[in-house]
Amino acid sequence: MKPAFIVISILILSSCNAVKPGDKVLNQEVPYEEAKNYFVKNNVNAALDNPKFETQQDFDKVFGMATTMGESGKPTPIDFSKEFAVAQVEDPSTQKVELKPVSIRKNANILEIKYRKIIGENQSYTSQHAMILIIDNKYNGDVNFVKVQ
């Protein structure tokens, strides 16, 4: 056999076992955008069972637009044909709560989303706080929120 044939055969055979995109990815940093100017609708009175939203219809069942004056007052647009949203929704509380994303990493098919929960002063009313993150569809996977200190 000729050496060139052997090399080509090995290359062809090894390419058949190539890893597909998204498979066996370990600790890959995932870019995201934080969605602003949305509120949790009154019909949602507990934390979410499924924190991932892949359609506008599912998103609209939980969130409403909180538009304010000025250019920065418009809700962050989400194009569900190219991206999906994930949300950490807290139970209703009379305390001021701020949720801050720390990082998103993909391990195999799991998106691990680390965030901080900052509890502030008491309020004279009850509110429900949420953190909504927008992620490109190429990073799609199961979602796992992890609260860190």
Image (cartoon, rainbow, N blue to C red):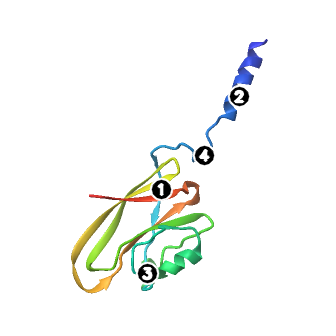
Outermost residue toward the left in this view: 121
Q: Amino acid at mark 1?
A: Pro
Q: Position of residue 11 (x, y in %)?
A: 69, 26
Q: Nearer the viewer, residue 128 or 47?
A: 47
Question: How far across and how far down the image is residue 73, in percent?
Answer: 43, 80
Residue 119: where, in percent of width, then height?
Answer: 24, 71
Instruction: Give residue 129's quadrant in the image.
Output: bottom left
Report if the CB atoms under discs 3 and 2 are less than 8 Å apart.
Answer: no
**Label 3 amino acid?**
Val
Q: Earlier in the sequence, mark 1 or mark 4?
A: 4
* As drawn, 44 above or below 109: below
Residue 14 image label: none
Please tell me the numbered disc located at residue 21.
4
- Which callout, 3 or 1, points at the residue further toward the start of the chain? 1
Disc 2 designates what residue? Answer: 13
Secondary structure beneath dot 4 equals loop
- What's under tag 4, amino acid-wise? Pro
Between marks 1 and 4 in the image, the one whose residue lies nearer the viewer: 4
Mark 3 and mark 4 lie on one chain; the one further toward the N terminus is 4
Task: Say whether residue 131 is left or right of residue 9.
Answer: left
Residue at horizontal 62%, vertical 43%? 20
Q: CA distance from mark 3 to mark 2?
A: 53 Å
Which circle marks residue 31 in the picture? 1
The disc label shown at residue 44, or none: 3
SS at badge 1:
loop
Q: Earlier in the sequence, mark 1 or mark 2?
A: 2
Which of pointers 4 and 2 lies earlier in the amino acid sequence? Answer: 2
